[in-house]
Amino acid sequence: MRKSSVNLTSTEKQATLSLAAIFAFRMLGLFMIIPVFSLYAQQLKGTTPLLMGIALGCYGLTQALLQIPFGMWSDKIGRKPIIILGLSLFALGSVVAAYSHTIWGVIIGRSLQGAGAIGSTIIALLADLTSEQVRTKAMAVIGITIGTAFSLGMILGPILNTLINVSGIFWLTAILAICGLMVLSYVPTPKKIVVHPEAEIIAADFRSVLRDKKLLQLDLSILLSHAILTASFVALPISLQNNAGLTEAHQWWLYLPVLLLAFISMPPFIMLAERKYPTGIFILSVCGLIIAEISFWVWQHSILGTAVALWLFFTSFTILEAILPSKVSKTAPAHSKGTAIGIYSSCQFFGIFLGGCLGGWIYGHYNAGVVLLVCAMLAILWLGITISGVNFKK
C-alpha cells in the first residue's frame, strides 16, 4: 500500500509523459528560434533593429497576457478544448511566420504562437489526473522536460538553420504542434474538473500573492533572467558574425560543445541549492551572468573567449531556471501556490518581451556590444536587489 502511494500508477504515468511531450514539442519550437533569429530577421523586408527585437520577444507578451485567462477558462469549459485551441494557434502562428517575408508578418506569426498560452492549462490537467501524493513528482517531470527542451533547442536551432533556414524551423514548429495534438489523444480525460489551489490560478488569491515581497522578488528575478537572455540573443549572433568572424552557418560549432558542457556542469550546483546553500548558489549564479555578459563584451573578437563566456552564461542561466520555480513553490502558501506560480510564469514571458524590445532598441542606437553591457548592468541591479533584503532559505 505504501509503495502505490509513492509511485505513479500506469494511468498517471501515461498522463505525465504525454503532457510532458506536449510541453516539449511546444517549447522546443520556441527555443530553436532564439539563437538564429536576429541574423535571419535582418534579411526581412521592413526590418529595423527595434522591430527585430520585438519579433523575437513578442510571443512572450501574448503568452504573458493570455496564460492566466486561458487557465481560468479551462476551469469552465474543460482542459482539452483549451489545449487544442492553444496548439492550433501555435501551429497557425508558425505557418504565418514561415510564409512571411516581412518583419511585420513574422511579428504577427510570433504573436499568434504566444497566443497559444497553454502552460497553466497543461499543469491544471496534470493535477486533475494525478493524486496529491505523486503530483510533485509529476510536476518535476514537466520541469525536467522544459530544461531539456531549452538545451536541445539552443543546439538544434543553429544546426537546422544550416539545413532548412529559419523559415524551415518555423515549419518544423508547426509540425511539432500537430504532433502535440496527436499526443493529446493519449492523455486520459478526467472524470471531472477540480480546482487545485496548489496547481491552479485562483482569482481571489491575486491580492495576497502580489503583496508578498518574497514572491515579488522571485517574480522580478525570473523577469530579469529572461529579459537578459532575450536581449543577449538579439546581440550575440550578430557579434559572433561581425566581430569574431563566425558565420551563421558555423555558429552551431560553438553552441553544441558549450551547451553540452553546461548541461554537465549544472547538476552539482542544483543539488547544493536544494540541500544546503540556496542563497549562496542563487547569488553565485547571478554573479555568473554578470561575468558572462562583461566577458561577451571584452572578448567579442575572440571565439575562444566567447565560448568560455557562453559556457558560464548557460550554466548560470540553467541553474537559475531550475531553482527559481522551486523557491516559488516553497515560498508561496499552500492555498495560493498555483496563483503564485501563474503570476511567476507571466513575469517570465513578459521578461522575454521586454528583453527583445530593449535589445533591439539599444542595438539600433548603438551596437551589439552595448546591448551586452546593458545586460550586465541589469544583472548587477538584480544582484543588488537580491543582496539588499531577501532570504531565499524559506
Image: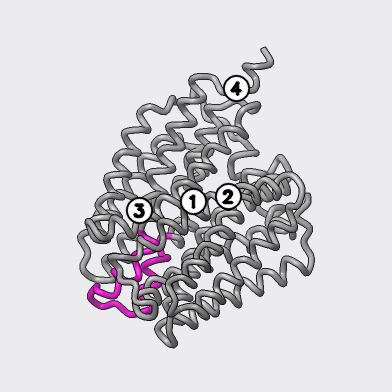
Say which residue label 1 marks. Answer: 67
Q: Nearer the viewer, residue 244 or 167?
A: 244
Say which residue label 4 marks. Answer: 7
Q: Nearer the viewer, mark 4 or mark 1?
A: 4
Q: Type of residue at label 3?
A: Leu
Question: Label 1, label 3: how many angstroms apart (C-alpha)?
Answer: 27 Å
Please give left or right for residue 197 compared with residue 36 in the image: right
x and y, in percent, of residue 205 in the image: 67, 48
Q: Check disc 2: other Cα within 10 Å, few if <14, some if 14-19, many if 20+.
A: many
SS for callout 3 = helix
x and y, in percent, of residue 319 in the image: 60, 54
Residue occupying image coordinates x 36% and y 59%:
33
Please give left or right for residue 158 compared with residue 149 in the image: left
Specify which label sits upstream in the sequence, 4 or 2: 4
Question: Label 4, label 1: how many angstroms apart (C-alpha)?
Answer: 30 Å
Image height of 166 relative to 41, above or below: above
SS for callout 2 = helix
Q: Nearer the viewer, mark 3 or mark 2?
A: 3
Q: Nearer the viewer, mark 1 or mark 3?
A: 3
Question: Label 4, label 2: how many angstroms apart (C-alpha)?
Answer: 27 Å
Residue occupying image coordinates x 50% and y 25%:
13
Range of the magenta residues? 33-59
Specify which label sits upstream in the sequence, 4 or 1: 4
Q: Type of residue at label 2?
A: Gly
From this viewpoint, which residue is outermost toward the top? 1
Q: Type of residue at label 1?
A: Gln
Question: Label 1, label 2: how many angstroms apart (C-alpha)?
Answer: 8 Å
Residue occupying image coordinates x 39% and y 47%:
26
Specify which label sits upstream in the sequence, 1 or 3: 1
Q: Type of residue at label 4?
A: Asn
Q: Check disc 4: other Cα within 10 Å, few if <14, some if 14-19, many if 20+.
A: few
